[in-house]
Each structure stands twice: as structure tokens, then as C-alpha cells.
Image (cartoon, rainbow, N blue to C red):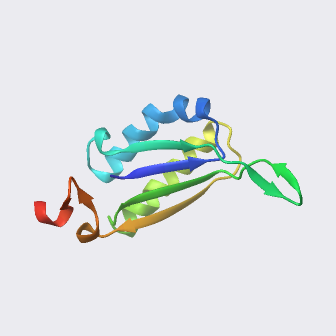
Amino acid sequence: MPQLTVRGVGNETLAQISGALIEELAQICECGTDNFTLDSLPVVSLFGGEVVPTYPFVEVAWFDRGQQVQDKLAAALTRHLQQAGVAEVEVAFKVYKETAYYINGQPCSAAE
């Protein structure tokens, strides 16, 4: 955790930036790089009866780390993608509660 799910960005582009991106995100979140997953979703977008390019969108699913960390994470994601040639990017955060997230049948809150 955090889990990044990306659509509208090519796999080659994500692979190219993934190392430096995850390193920076781990520093921002003050956790190890092995806490992150980065997934690329193949999406077909439709509009007006035609197939159209999918808009670049990143969803970050995580445990809330506060507004300042969230702002830094969104800025870093956007910067890395724009430097790789993605003109415009949207980032959204989905927050999990530890009591509602389970690993091997045990809530994350049980580890506290």
C-alpha cells in the first residue's frame, strides 16, 4: 500500500519512469519501495460512437497520510508523467480504513 492504478498511459512509458517514480513516492510516504504496486489498466474509451484515446488517469488507493503528503504525491506523479510526455494527468485518491482492509483474513488494524 499505496496501490497505483493507471489508465491512458502506455506500458512502455510507465516502465520507463517506474523506478525513479516509486523511489520518490517512497521518500514522500516515508516507507519502502516494496510497499507500492503500480498497475496499468488496458482501457478502451468510447465517445460519439467512436473509439477515442483514453484520458490519462491515476488512482491511488492508500491509507490516509494527510493532505501535505497527498499533495506531494500527486505533484510527483504528475511531474514524472509529464516529463515522460504525457501532456495532462488527473490523479485521484481512494482512502481505505485499516479496519476495512484485510491481509490474509486479518484486518490491518489488528497489527497495531
Q: How many marks?
A: 0
Q: Residue at x 37, y 38 (%)?
A: 23
* Residue 94, x across and y down, in percent: 44, 65
Left or right? Give the position of 102 relative to 64: left
**Residue 35: image x %, image y %?**
30, 45
Left or right, 25 with respect to 108, comes to right
Taking depth in this image into account, of 35 and 42 the one nearest to the observer is 42
In the displayed structure, would residue 88 be above or below residue 14?
A: below
> In the rendering, at what x and y percent does residue 85 appear?
68, 38
Question: Most extreme residue toward the right, as rendered?
Answer: 49
Q: Please tell me which residue is depicted at 53% across the width and 30% down the height of the picture.
A: 15
Left or right of residue 69, residue 49 in this image: right
Quadrant location, the C terminus:
bottom left
* Residue 34 x/y as whole percent: 29, 39
Which picture quadrant has residue 14? Answer: top right
